[in-house]
């Protein structure tokens, strides 16, 4: 009888110990969430995208803020229910949120999980340059009319360094080539079957991803401005 009681006592102890270990490992887990900025460039001009993951207790809270000249501007503070293991957010930087301006800044992403130890906090900071002003493009010389099936050459100047620039004819993009600092030239062609009102447009994209497009490319972002265009004409 005593042996049975002792065996029962041992079983109870093992169950309690197992439950305690399970609670300690699962509910009081110490693994922090992971935070990843999906914006690789140092320049931020339109959006700021980041991802937070926690495969154990799940993401509980995410906070995003920008520190500039000693002042902190909150961009996001959001809470999430249990079972949320992945959060991906895209924050709009243009137009600039109140309190921010173009220039150097630090982005800080703070996350907390659902662990019973009051949550495991993690923080990620990155130095960035906020640049919401699109590059300016000035056409220096070009043929204003190009025959269908013909080719053209345009020279132009940009107000800043633009890793991507050139001429777009319909869906075809012809890259520009640097002639000197911020001065470029681009060769382009107009397809033989292009409509008579086809337009070739100079465009430029800076390091922050802002693109100067023609006024015909409507956009609600406010980044569209006047550009010089070249029309094709019916061949002789």
Image: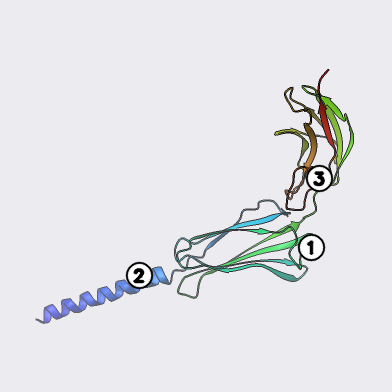
Whole-percent x, y for residue 32 in the image: 51, 65
Indicate whether 205 appears above or below 9. Answer: above
Residue where numbered disc 2 is placed: 22
Residue at figure coordinates x 81%, y 20% from the top left: 235
Instruction: Say which of 15 and 73 sits in front.
Output: 73
Whole-percent x, y for residue 177 in the image: 80, 33
Whole-percent x, y for residue 39 in the image: 65, 53
Q: Decide if residue 169 is on the left or right side of residue 116.
A: right
Instruction: Say which of 88 and 221 sits in front.
Output: 221
Q: Quadrant of residue 183?
A: top right
Q: Secondary structure at mark 3?
A: loop
Whole-percent x, y for residue 140 in the image: 90, 36
Residue at figure coordinates x 46%, y 71% from the top left: 115
Q: Which quadrant would the N terminus be assigned to in this image?
A: bottom left
Q: Quadrant of residue 233?
A: top right
Q: Which quadrant would the C terminus be assigned to in this image?
A: top right
The Cα–Cα distance between marks 2 and 1, rounded to whole angstroms, is 50 Å
Q: Is residue 184 visible?
A: no
The Cα–Cα distance between marks 1 and 3, rounded to whole angstroms, is 20 Å
Residue where numbered disc 1 is placed: 101
Single out the mark in the foreground, 1 or 3. 1
Extreme residue toward the left, this view:
1
The earlier-in-sequence mark between 2 and 1 is: 2
């Amino acid at each position: 009888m005593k042996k049975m009681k002792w065996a029962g006592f041992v079983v109870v102890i093992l169950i309690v110990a197992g439950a305690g270990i399970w609670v300690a490992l699962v509910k009081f887990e110490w693994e922090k969430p992971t935070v990843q900025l999906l914006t690789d460039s140092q320049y931020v001009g339109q959006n700021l995208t980041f991802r937070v993951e926690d495969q154990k207790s799940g993401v509980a809270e995410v906070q995003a803020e920008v520190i500039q000249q000693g002042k902190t501007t909150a961009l996001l503070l959001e809470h999430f229910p249990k079972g949320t293991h992945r959060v991906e957010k895209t924050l709009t930087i243009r137009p600039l949120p109140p309190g921010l301006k173009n220039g150097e800044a630090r982005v800080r992403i703070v996350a907390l999980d659902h662990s019973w130890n009051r949550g495991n906090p993690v923080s990620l900071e990155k130095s960035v340059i906020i640049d919401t002003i699109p590059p300016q493009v000035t056409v220096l010389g070009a043929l204003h009319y190009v025959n269908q099936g013909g080719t053209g050459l345009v020279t132009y100047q940009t107000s800043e360094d633009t890793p991507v620039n050139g001429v777009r004819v319909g869906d075809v993009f012809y890259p520009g080539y640097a002639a000197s600092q911020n001065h470029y030239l681009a060769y382009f062609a107009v397809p033989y079957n292009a409509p008579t009102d086809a337009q070739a447009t100079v465009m430029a994209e800076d390091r922050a991803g802002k693109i100067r497009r023609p006024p015909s490319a409507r956009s609600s972002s406010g980044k569209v401005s006047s550009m010089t265009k070249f029309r094709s004409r019916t061949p002789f």
